[in-house]
Amino acid sequence: MSGINGAAELLSVANNPDYSETGGGHGAKGVDFPRWWAVFRMMELEKANEPDFLLLFESVQDVAELDSASAPTRARVYQVKKKDSGSWTWAVLTGTVTPKDPSAPPKKPAKTTAATPKAPDFSKVAGSVLGKLHLSLSAFTALPVEGVFLSNAGCDLPLAGGGSASTTMPCSLTDLSPDHVQLLTDAFASLAPGGPPPDLARVKLQKVAIHPDKLDAPAIAAALELLMERSPLHAGQAKALVESLVMKISPLTRGTDACKTFEDLVKERGFSRGAFIDALAALETVPDRMALLSDFLGQLQAEGMPFITIAAIRVAAARVQQERLTGGTDVSREIDDFSDGWIAANPPTPTLRPYVEAALTELKVKFSAHRDQDLIARFVMRAITKCVDQN
């Protein structure tokens, strides 16, 4: 199919509120989870050298991934859900009752005459996680599309070859045990009587290693890896890059109005590879902290600070920069805050060594348990950060 037809069909589905997700019942973390994962996914796509991509937010389910920002020819629709503990169960995922285990011993027959077995209850399928995902896929008739239920928790569903989907992911719904596949096929078929048979192979279950209490860590790690490859001098800005991308995405998840054109949909709810590349390019305009550190230490050495002290400060500063990627500790943030206050009250002077030594004297009074080179390194990196933030 042509990309133009794909864009038109995508617009039509996105404008139908039956196929979009608007927030959830898991509080702030539940809302943030898809955003942080989306940034992680961008890193994956860029690392894979995809020529183009577009992520649409809360247009078709939580996230829709297209292969083009202008003329899509295929799509992947994601339900992205956080779970604080345990695994996802069959009942929650499908809205149906778990099939009986054929190997389980039969129950004792009732004394009364056995009643005719009741037909499965499919009344809750449409509102279930996988039911909504299946309905979204069924809305597309021209654009090739697949669905993914993605979570930080596994799915406690039996596989055909033994084992559980909770430990064997990703997998498709066709990989489940035969009785579960049959029940799910019947359940999905009940949503559109007389329609084409449900294609369970199009729906995948996927687990992602994102901890609910540390949503940013995988995206930062992926950004660091990408920057080390593409722009090593700016690898220390991985955390800032990820945070800025999440901030750019957040407004895109709040759109509820119908869009007149595919271009409007992209503008209001989409984030493209082009926008991602622009964010990477913006890093090149920000001074590199480690390069500024070399200049700073070079001047300190020229002013008579011993080489061995300079070397120790450089090693400590590298640790500080690495720690910055993970958010630091309470004590390190306290030192940073103290340094910021001291710098604000004592603007840098042309001669750096007396300035740094005066700061060290104050720092040692409050943080006497720390080594001089560690305190100097943290102070210098804060001074450099202040310089960067002003540019």
Image: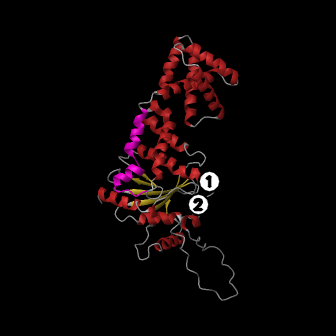
Q: Is residue 190 above or below residue 355?
A: below
Query: What is the number of the mark on residue 84?
Result: 1
Q: Which of the 4 quarters of the picture holds residue 356?
A: top right
Q: Is residue 240 left or right of residue 84?
A: left
Question: Camera-side residue: 355 or 311?
Answer: 355
Q: Nearer the viewer, mark 1 or mark 2?
A: 1
Q: Which residue is mark 2?
A: 88
Q: Quadrant of the N terminus?
A: bottom left
**Vertical side of 53 occupied by 374: above or below:** above
Disc 2: CA contacts within 10 A as few (<14), some (14-19) or many (>=20)? some
Boundaries of the magenta span: 257-283
Task: State how many labels appear.
Answer: 2
Please state which amino acid type lies under the numbered disc 2.
Answer: Trp
Residue 249 drawn at (x, y percent): 46, 46
Q: Position of residue 348 (x, y in %)?
A: 54, 18
Q: CA distance from mark 1 to mark 2?
A: 11 Å
Q: Is residue 282 magenta?
A: yes
Quadrant that contains the C terminus = top left
Work out whether residue 160 can be spotted: no
Asked if residue 164 is among those painted magenta in the image, a careful observer would answer: no
Left or right, 333 with respect to 2, comes to right
Q: Secondary structure at mark 1?
A: loop
Q: Position of residue 287 (x, y in %)?
A: 45, 27
Amino acid type of the residue that numbered disc 1 sits on in the rendered structure: Asp
**Going 41% across and 31% down the picture, which residue do you hit?**
284
Of the pair 157 and 385, the residue shown nearer to us: 385
**Magenta stretch, main secondary structure class:** helix
Task: Estimate how packed mark 1 is, as few (under 14), some (14 to 19) or many (20 or more) residues with alpha carbons within 10 Å.
Answer: few
Provide the secondary structure element on which disc 2 rests: loop
**Is residue 116 visible to us here?**
yes
Query: In the rendering, at what x and y percent does residue 207 appear?
Result: 53, 54
- Please say if 312 is above or below 277: above
